[in-house]
Image (spheres, rainbow, N blue to C red):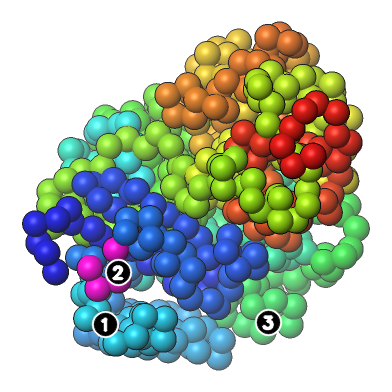
């Protein structure tokens, strides 16, 4: 290997679901992709991220044997030297584990050990690339991976940093203090006390899939009414710890017992609540909405106690959030509303798929001393341009236009009630569409929201949509004073002006999950919003991910075309090309 070239660090996340690959150079992520976007199978459960790996290598023009290392976000040494085995044994002495839990523990000890990781990755690399001189595998503790990524890619220094997920190594939640490039743990909470497991259990109880449907529970909670009796029952599952700061989960309701209905909760939870779980196709009643609210409230109160303590202890008022629970935008908003907190940054790649990037960033820092700059864009995946799309459209005999002023034309379409599939530039990383693979609509009428839900997204009618908004418009549309929410990781209270101007983007509880669009980070999307404002006076668009229910966000031209023709979309934009279901008659190539 030529050591005079730029050093390149790969990160791979290849757990049960959401496998992904990232490339780090010069202290920053330069490419990232999730396997589901290539195989078109949501979450790509059980698959190795082979296609994502090939994309990332191609993006930097290297072979696998030319990268410096591959990092994984697991403390594999602890699975190899007996530490995790002893931890599991100690757990078993406190709570008698059921067969499923024992099987999971044995699988972790085998799969996440140094040897297990080496065998797993080498087998897939050898199958795909042959017998190369494979790069070394670096192991980074799971919660440190989340914390480094969230804190070091935030604009805050110093910062209290909260990492919270299902579990990672022995931990479920850790509070850290970031000072410069140093991260110091302040509190550590271990299995079985897990907010991620708590929320996943109720996600499945309410008839959704764990680690997929949590955002549905969060959305459903907005329709709930406070119910003291339900809150008391939920409080038996998740309660404050004796110290009044931490939380404790009663594992009898999650792991240790009979699992007639789900692997995520025991029959004791069903007995506690006094009602059977909602079937997947069952009706959603008010009781389910009230339960969702009780669960969401319990989660928020647990993290608020932790963060409030950390702020008091350190005097640091800015907060970063990492780990999969950080995708809960209502929780993040509740943290921001704490009087002792000034600003909150929830990392948009906080889940385990994003740990591919986090682990590579840690290794790069350890070996080069480089610290990543604050995150400003997630446009890190495969690129779509008009030049690349044109031959695909021609081969498929799909007529298209190349407008003289794309942004003015599409702004007029949106203002006239057309719904647009917008595919532009590099695919954004993570679960939120941010103006690279978006479905866009006029936000001024709730009928547009309902149409997008019913005939395009094909999802539950109660699910909310968020706005993409010019960053300059935030003071007039959002409360309280807004942090820079450019990645849709925060919910804010909508002002009366937003409810009047863009009601389709305001949830039933008066909040809105917003993307603030900056010209320097996404100039083309910013230009479209500016054009829409010039026509309507409203610098806002309804923005949702370009996919239908049960499918990943589209990646390439073929994905976009399939979804376009299979739904009620009116217009498809591919770079500087436009496809219409009802051509306007304007002169265009491919017509």
Relative to 342, does residue 137 appear above or below in the rendering? below
Residue 457 drawn at (x, y percent):
79, 48
Q: What span is in magenta?
A: 62-66
Q: Which of pointers 3 and 2 indicates the residue nearer the eye?
A: 2
Q: State the SS at label 3.
A: loop
Residue 404 vs 563, above or below: the answer is: above
Task: Tell me the tag on residue 309.
Answer: none
**Quick check: marks 2 and 1 in contact, CB under 8 Å?**
yes
Residue 8 visible to the viewer? yes
Q: Earlier in the sequence, mark 3 or mark 2?
A: 2
Quadrant of the image for the N terminus?
A: bottom left
Q: Which mark is residue 132?
A: 1
Tell whether label 1 touches label 3 (CB within 8 Å): no
**Disc count in the image?**
3
State the image quarter where residue 59 is shown: bottom left
**Above or below — where is 187 with respect to 311?**
below
Residue 64 highlighted magenta (yes or no):
yes
Residue placed at 61% from the left, 53% from the top?
A: 556
- Tell me which numbered mark, 3 or 1, is placed earlier along the sequence: 1
- Mark 2 = which residue? 63
Real-space CA distance between mark 3 and mark 2, rounded to the nearest whole angstrom: 46 Å
Q: Position of residue 5 (x, y in %)?
A: 14, 56
Q: Quadrant of the C terminus?
A: top right
Residue that mark 3 sits on: 259
């Amino acid at each position: 290997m030529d050591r005079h070239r730029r050093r390149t660090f790969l990160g791979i996340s290849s757990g049960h679901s959401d496998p992904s690959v990232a490339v780090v150079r010069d202290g920053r992520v330069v490419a990232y992709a999730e396997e589901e976007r290539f195989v078109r199978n949501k979450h790509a459960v059980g698959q190795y991220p082979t296609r994502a790996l090939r994309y990332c290598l191609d993006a930097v023009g290297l072979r696998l044997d030319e990268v410096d290392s591959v990092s994984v976000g697991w403390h594999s040494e602890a699975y190899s030297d007996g530490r995790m085995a002893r931890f599991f044994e100690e757990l078993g002495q406190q709570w008698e584990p059921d067969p499923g839990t024992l099987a999971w523990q044995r699988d972790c000890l085998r799969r996440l050990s140094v040897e297990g990781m080496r065998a797993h990755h080498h087998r897939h690399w050898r199958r795909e690339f042959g017998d190369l001189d494979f790069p070394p595998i670096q192991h980074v503790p799971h919660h440190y991976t989340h914390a480094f990524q969230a804190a070091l890619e935030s604009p805050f220094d110093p910062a209290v940093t909260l990492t919270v997920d299902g579990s990672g190594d022995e931990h479920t939640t850790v509070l850290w203090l970031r000072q410069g490039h140093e991260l110091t743990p302040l509190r550590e909470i271990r299995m079985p006390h897990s907010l991620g497991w708590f929320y996943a259990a109720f996600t499945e109880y309410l008839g959704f899939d764990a680690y997929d449907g949590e955002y549905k529970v969060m959305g459903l909670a907005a329709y709930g009414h406070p119910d003291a009796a339900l809150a008391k029952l939920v409080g038996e599952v998740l309660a404050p710890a004796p110290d009044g700061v931490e939380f404790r989960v009663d594992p009898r309701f999650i792991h240790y017992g009979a699992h007639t209905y789900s692997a995520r909760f025991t029959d004791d939870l069903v007995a506690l609540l006094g009602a059977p779980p909602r079937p997947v196709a069952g009706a959603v009643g008010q009781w389910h909405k009230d339960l969702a609210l009780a669960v969401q409230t319990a989660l928020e109160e647990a993290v608020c106690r932790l963060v409030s303590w950390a702020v008091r202890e350190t005097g640091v008022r800015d907060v970063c959030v990492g780990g999969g629970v950080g995708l809960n935008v209502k929780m993040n908003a509740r943290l921001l509303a704490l009087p002792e907190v000034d600003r909150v940054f929830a990392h948009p790649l906080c889940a385990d798929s994003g740990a591919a990037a986090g682990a590579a960033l840690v290794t790069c820092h350890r070996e080069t001393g480089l610290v990543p700059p604050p995150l400003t864009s997630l446009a890190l995946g495969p690129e779509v341009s008009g030049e690349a799309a044109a031959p695909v459209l021609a081969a498929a005999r799909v007529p298209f236009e190349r407008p003289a002023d794309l942004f003015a034309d599409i702004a007029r379409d949106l203002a006239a009630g057309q719904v647009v599939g917008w595919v532009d530039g590099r695919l954004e990383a993570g679960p939120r569409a941010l103006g690279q693979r978006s479905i866009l609509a006029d936000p001024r009428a709730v009928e547009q929201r309902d149409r997008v839900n019913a005939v395009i997204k094909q999802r539950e009618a109660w699910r909310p949509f968020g706005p993409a908004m010019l960053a300059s418009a935030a003071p007039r549309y959002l409360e309280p004073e807004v942090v820079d929410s450019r990645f849709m990781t925060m919910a804010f209270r909508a002002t009366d002006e937003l409810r009047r101007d863009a009601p389709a983007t305001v949830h039933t509880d008066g909040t809105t999950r917003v993307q603030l669009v900056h010209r320097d980070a996404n100039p083309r999307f910013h230009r479209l919003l500016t054009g829409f404002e010039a026509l309507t006076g409203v610098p806002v668009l309804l923005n949702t991910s370009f996919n239908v229910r049960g499918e990943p966000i589209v990646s390439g031209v073929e994905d976009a075309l399939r979804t376009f023709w299979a739904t009620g979309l009116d217009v498809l934009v591919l770079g500087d090309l436009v496809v219409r279901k009802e051509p306007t008659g304007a002169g265009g190539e491919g017509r």
